[in-house]
Image (cartoon, rainbow, N blue to C red):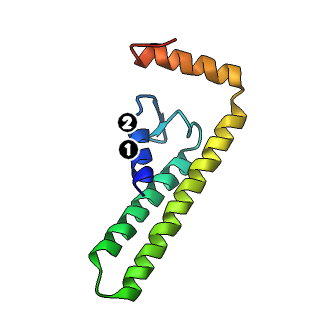
Amino acid sequence: MLLLRTMGTMFMLLPAHEQVDESLVPILVFKDRPIAYHAFLVSIMISLTGAFSALLIQHKPRVERFCRVYAMASMISALSILLCATIYWGFTYPPHLAELEIRIWMKKYATLYW
């Protein structure tokens, strides 16, 4: 759970974003796939809501179990969306082009690069 929230925050803090349909999409993994990025963020939010609800509702075991189940289901869907986007990103960029793109990004946004 903490891993997914950290990933969502990390993607929002990346400096390399691209404007697609009036919304910011990180270039690193979700380039040309804004729907997958928004589905990833919605899954993270639903997972956070379910986990928080399960913590707050302690005297009703059925409701608490339901909240835990939909929190886990949305967490698994967020991880699967991220995995699919990563696999798609890995296949669309040949390794030498990806390395060149990373070096250009590092020169532009980082103070230290190789």
Helix, strand or loop at disc 1?
helix
Structural distance between the alpha carbons of marks 1 and 2: 6 Å
Identified at 39% across, 54% down, the residue is: 2
Residue 85 percent location from the top left of the image: 61, 45
Q: Is residue 2 left or right of residue 83?
A: left
Identified at 57% across, 49% down, the residue is: 82
The amino acid type found where label 1 is placed reads Thr
Residue 49 percent location from the top left of the image: 36, 66
19 over 81 or under it: above or below: above
91 over 68 or under it: above or below: above
**Residue on which disc 2 sits:** 13
Q: Is there CB contact under 8 Å for labels 1 and 2?
A: yes
**Residue on which disc 1 sits:** 9
State the image quarter where residue 80 is shown.
Answer: bottom right
Helix, strand or loop at disc 2?
helix
The amino acid type found where label 2 is placed reads Leu
Identified at 61% across, 49% down, the residue is: 83
70 over 12 or under it: above or below: below
Around disc 2, counting alpha carbons within 10 Å, would you say few (fewer than 14), some (14 to 19), or many (20 or more)? Answer: few
Q: Is residue 23 left or right of residue 52?
A: right
Q: Is residue 111 left or right of residue 72?
A: left
State the image quarter where residue 53 is shown.
Answer: bottom left
Quadrant including the N terminus:
bottom left
Residue 23 percent location from the top left of the image: 43, 42
